[in-house]
């Protein structure tokens, strides 16, 4: 018998028992091999006992495709395993599921699921959307679909066209072999789907007209708005999942990515041409990514690809700046003076009692290494990187507009607003609890009837008074977390001070004190940052839930802001300390600043703090990238998958040898990790963007390491989405949302940070002031002596002098790095005139640098239009083409209906015409035409 003619199609089925006698052709269809599975619901059931012969209300019914119910033909058969009495909670959930599934059938969907034949286990509810439902919902959602009209995209001018052709030939080996890249000069006109205008579309096959992502999106929209009265009028599948009525809901992947044979599906194609490390050199198939995963994920990978490609020029310039430092290290006069042992600068002790006087020439290596990053080229590179950030954001806006044109994302604001109308389950629960607390019985009555006519009333929504406790908890918790981060940074500072003092007591470790303390402190900072990153991510999510945002978009924006604030403070606090605070509050010999009664505040190295800032930045940046990528992004998902697999095998009744040989696609996808959003991926790249831009003056090689990381990151994320995650719901969006505002803010903030790094942390400004104000010959000869002040060792406090000094000569004056008056001056040890000259020059540089770079950034923003000229012209051209196409198709559709009517009118007039002969209305067409097909769908 033909499976479509069976009396019961969507019945409860025995596991692995096909309904059709035909062999299974695809694991993506119902058991009748005809209808495609568009969505899957999963729930876990547990029976208290099994008593044959006692029927269960849940299993005496079988769901039929038209939404009716009938007696299960096998119900109560001898030997069948049927459920015993269930506990109250399980029975209640079962009734809620039955009502929800019945409502889905009423909405036109078709369901299929397995028989609950075991003591406990998971049941997969397969959902299929027939053509009538797809057409109805596509019209309701205003989904744009391609029409019959194809047109050639207008090419550029002759020079641009020739250059583009050459570029296409050169980049041909880098293009992925996917169908979307075969012909990108032709485009279909798109128009929102309408059942009354079916003649506009080229519908050759109703089963394939809507791709799998669109079909699953339509089903998901139905699932989100279907209510369940037995579950307190919960609206949508998300509410049911949140209350454990269902366990999961997801669309299916398009088959296996590693299946043998020549059969190719989109998932397998993505794996071969995108999600393998062996194709790291190829461009991303952005169109195929968008088709398979939806616009939101497609925009993320398009943004990540553009960001990675923009890192190439910045990496080249950064390497050139570093090589310039290496090439000019022998010509750097200050470092040569520091390394010259004939100068014999006797420096003051670095600690009390145990530290001796020392020669500045012993810090020769640090001084030479500092020149690699502290040279005039870094200033130029900082200006370049500020402009680079602006150009990157401007080019992203242009690429976003280009993708929006090709992906038909223009005019989706209404769709976004409609998506915002769905409240989150937690919000509905809070509103329901609030209404139940009200003493007025009319509120309870309105809850029971599900009335939402006056949704703006205070009792129907959460006001600021209801949210005030959550806001206060958020404010206090964020302040506490920030204070905790600062406390940990201070704890590391205390560790550095005490460890340096302890190691200085031992002669064997005294020579390597600074290297040991710096290295261990940076590693501690890295470990703390990685731990707090995970804690702050969970805390930010918990705090956002306390706020109870109404919509998913609001929830995501608030979560992003909290997580970014906490993780930004966590990642950059140690770096900010080294850059702007270390060595600024030390004091001077004879009047040092102490912490914990006896421990002096730590000083910068003789060559300055810039080298230590570079070390701190590089280790934290590389450590975060390597550890988070390899452990958190690769290892943790694999461990979760293994744990889920072992847990499934350990549950009684779950293992089935017959099924394990030929597992269904929905079972395979269920074992994958659920998709939880793009926030972790974006956050990782945003923090990296901060490392690349904020302190690039101290670490010009940051873009190089970011580029190397991102080449791997693109394929790592691709592999995760294709092989390790359930297929996410396709979400249409026109931009990357709040992340663009964060990127823009970091870009502007980086200008200020780099200005202060160059002015305060590096020696660039003191060298300029000395060269043009104090040098006798306009060179840097004598600069080191100019930056060192004198101190009379006889004025050291009692008990702080070096014990058992073994310095070669008797010391009367020692030197320390600062601009202070000498001991013989009228105001000894006060800040000298040179100090105020350098300070004013530093402040002037910050103001000039900031305004210059901001002006250049605004200029770049003004020169580069947000919308590419060719895209703007194509949008205007497309509108005119569509008007012509619409009128032409309308005329061709009306002509066959108007001519018979006109002839019948003429025949009636010639024969004395009766009023019965009337013209056919222009909006109707003959039976069998495409218009009648549309009207047929309307009646569904």
Image: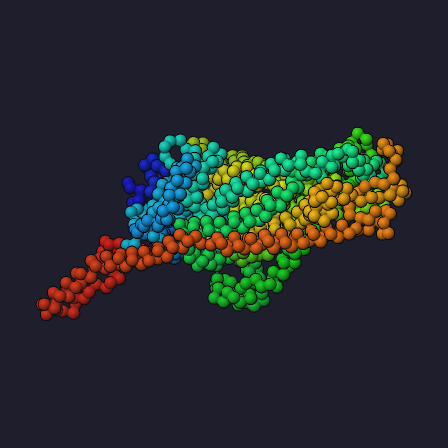
Q: How far across and down, in percent of the image, does residue 96 sit?
A: 47, 52
Q: Quadrant of residue 696?
A: top right
Q: Relative to 328, is 362 on the left or the right?
A: right
Number of on-image labels: 0
Report the front residue among 523 and 330. 330
Instruction: State the image coordinates of residue 35 (x, y, percent, origin top left).
Output: 35, 44
Q: Quadrant of the N terminus?
A: top left
Judging from the image, the colouring scheme is rainbow
Res 226 → quadrant: bottom left
Residue 147 percent location from the top left of the image: 32, 52
Left or right placement of residue 113 versus residue 356 in this view = left
Q: Within the image, what quadrant is residue 516 found in?
A: top right
Q: Nearer the viewer, residue 681 or 622?
A: 622
Q: Write the residue at 73% across / 40% down.
A: 781
Tell me which residue sits at (53%, 67%) in the image: 457
Relative vertical location of residue 302 with respect to residue 259 in this rendering, above or below: below
The residue located at (32%, 56%) in the rendering is 881
Pick out the residue farthest to the left: 911
Nearest the camera: 276 or 229? 276
Q: Relative to residue 269, is residue 886 drawn left or right? A: left
Image coordinates of residue 385 in percent, x first then y, are 57, 46
Can residue 887 be seen? Answer: yes
**Does residue 101 appear in the picture of this structure?**
no
- In the rendered image, which quarter contains the C terminus? bottom left
Q: Residue at x 74, y 37 (%)?
A: 338
* Up/down of 25 relative to 296, above or below: above
Outermost residue toward the front? Answer: 777
């Amino acid at each position: 018998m033909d499976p479509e003619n069976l009396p019961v199609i969507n019945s409860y089925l025995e596991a692995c028992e096909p309904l059709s006698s035909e062999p299974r052709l695809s694991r993506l269809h119902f058991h009748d091999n005809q209808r495609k599975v568009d969505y899957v619901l999963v729930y876990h059931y547990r029976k208290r006992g099994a008593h044959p012969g006692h029927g269960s209300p849940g299993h005496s019914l079988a769901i039929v495709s038209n939404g009716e119910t009938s007696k299960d033909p096998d119900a109560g058969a001898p030997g069948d395993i049927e459920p015993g009495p269930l506990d109250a909670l399980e029975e209640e959930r079962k009734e809620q599921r039955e009502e929800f599934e019945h409502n889905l059938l009423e909405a036109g969907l078709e369901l299929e699921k397995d028989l609950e034949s075991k003591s406990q286990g998971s049941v997969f509810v397969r959902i299929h959307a027939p053509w009538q439902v797809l057409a109805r919902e596509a019209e309701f959602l205003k989904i744009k679909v391609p029409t019959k009209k194809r047109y050639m995209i207008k090419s550029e001018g002759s020079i641009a066209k020739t250059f583009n052709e050459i570029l296409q030939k050169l980049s041909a080996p880098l293009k992925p072999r996917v169908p979307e890249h075969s012909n990108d000069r032709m485009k279909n006109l798109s128009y929102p789907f309408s059942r009354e205008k079916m003649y506009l579309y080229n519908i050759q096959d109703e089963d394939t007209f809507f791709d799998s992502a669109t079909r699953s999106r339509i089903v998901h929209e139905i699932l989100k708005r279907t209510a369940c009265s037995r579950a307190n009028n919960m609206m949508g599948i998300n509410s049911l999942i949140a209350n454990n009525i269902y366990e999961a809901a997801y669309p299916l992947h398009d088959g296996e990515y590693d299946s043998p044979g020549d059969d190719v599906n989109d998932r397998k194609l993505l794996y071969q041409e995108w999600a393998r490390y062996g194709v790291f050199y190829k461009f991303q198939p952005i169109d195929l990514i968008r088709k398979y995963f939806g616009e939101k994920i497609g925009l993320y990978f398009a943004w990540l690809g553009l960001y990675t490609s923009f890192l190439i020029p910045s990496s080249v310039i950064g390497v050139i700046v570093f090589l310039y430092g290496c090439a000019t290290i022998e010509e750097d006069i200050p470092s040569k003076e520091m390394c010259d042992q004939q100068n014999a600068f006797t420096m003051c002790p670095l600690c009390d009692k145990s530290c001796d006087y020392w020669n500045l020439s012993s810090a020769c290596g640090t001084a030479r290494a500092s020149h690699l990053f502290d040279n005039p080229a870094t200033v130029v590179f900082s200006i370049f990187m500020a402009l680079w950030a602006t150009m990157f954001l401007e080019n992203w806006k242009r690429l976003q507009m280009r993708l929006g044109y090709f992906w038909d994302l223009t005019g989706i604001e209404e769709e976004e607003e409609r998506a915002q109308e769905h409240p989150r389950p937690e919000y509905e629960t809070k509103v329901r609890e609030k209404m139940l607390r009200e003493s007025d019985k009319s509120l309870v009555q309105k809850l029971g009837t599900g009335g939402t006519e006056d949704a703006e009333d205070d009792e129907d929504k959460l006001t600021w008074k209801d949210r005030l406790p959550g806001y206060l908890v958020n404010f206090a918790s964020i302040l506490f977390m920030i204070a905790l981060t600062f406390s940990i940074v201070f704890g590391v500072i205390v560790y550095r001070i005490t460890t340096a003092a302890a190691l200085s007591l031992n002669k064997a470790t005294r020579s390597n004190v600074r290297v040991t303390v710096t290295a261990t402190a940076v590693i501690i900072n890295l470990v703390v940052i990685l731990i707090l990153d995970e804690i702050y991510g969970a805390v930010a999510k918990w705090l956002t839930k306390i706020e109870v945002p109404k919509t998913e978009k609001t929830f995501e924006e608030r979560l992003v802001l909290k997580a970014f604030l906490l993780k930004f403070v966590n990642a950059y606090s140690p770096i900010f300390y080294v850059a702007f605070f270390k060595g600024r509050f030390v004091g001077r010999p004879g009047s040092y600043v102490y912490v914990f009664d006896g421990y002096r505040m730590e000083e910068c190295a003789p060559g300055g703090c810039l080298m230590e800032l570079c070390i701190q930045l590089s280790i934290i940046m590389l450590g975060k990238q390597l550890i988070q990528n390899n452990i958190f992004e690769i290892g943790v998902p694999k461990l979760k998958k293994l744990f889920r697999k072992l847990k499934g095998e350990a549950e009684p009744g779950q293992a089935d040898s017959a099924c394990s040989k030929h597992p269904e696609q929905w079972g395979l996808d269920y074992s994958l990790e659920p998709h939880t959003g793009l926030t972790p991926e974006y956050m990782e790249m945003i923090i990296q963007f901060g490392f690349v831009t904020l302190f690039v003056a101290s670490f010009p090689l940051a873009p190089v390491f970011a580029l190397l990381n991102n080449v791997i990151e693109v394929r790592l994320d691709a592999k995760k989405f294709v092989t390790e995650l359930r297929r996410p719901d396709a979400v249409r969006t026109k931009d990357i949302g709040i992340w663009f505002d964060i990127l823009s803010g970091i870009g502007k903030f980086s200008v200020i940070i780099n200005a202060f790094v160059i002015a305060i942390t590096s020696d660039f400004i003191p060298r300029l002031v000395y060269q043009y104000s104090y040098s006798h010959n306009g060179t840097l000869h004598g600069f080191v002596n100019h930056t060192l002040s004198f101190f009379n060792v006889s004025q050291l406090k009692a008990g702080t002098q070096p014990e058992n000094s073994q310095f070669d000569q008797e010391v009367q004056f020692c030197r320390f790095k600062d601009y202070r008056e000498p001991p013989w001056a009228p105001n000894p040890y006060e800040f000298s005139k040179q100090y105020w000259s350098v300070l004013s020059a530093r402040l002037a540089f910050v103001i000039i640098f900031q305004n210059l770079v901001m002006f250049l950034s605004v200029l770049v923003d003004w020169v580069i239009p947000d919308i590419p000229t060719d895209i703007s012209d194509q949008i205007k051209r497309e509108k005119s083409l569509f008007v012509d196409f619409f009128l032409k198709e309308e005329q061709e559709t009306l002509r066959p209906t108007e001519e018979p009517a006109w002839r019948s009118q003429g025949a009636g007039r010639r024969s004395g015409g009766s009023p019965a002969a009337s013209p056919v209305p222009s909006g109707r067409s003959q039976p069998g035409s495409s218009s009648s097909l549309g009207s047929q769908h309307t009646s569904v």
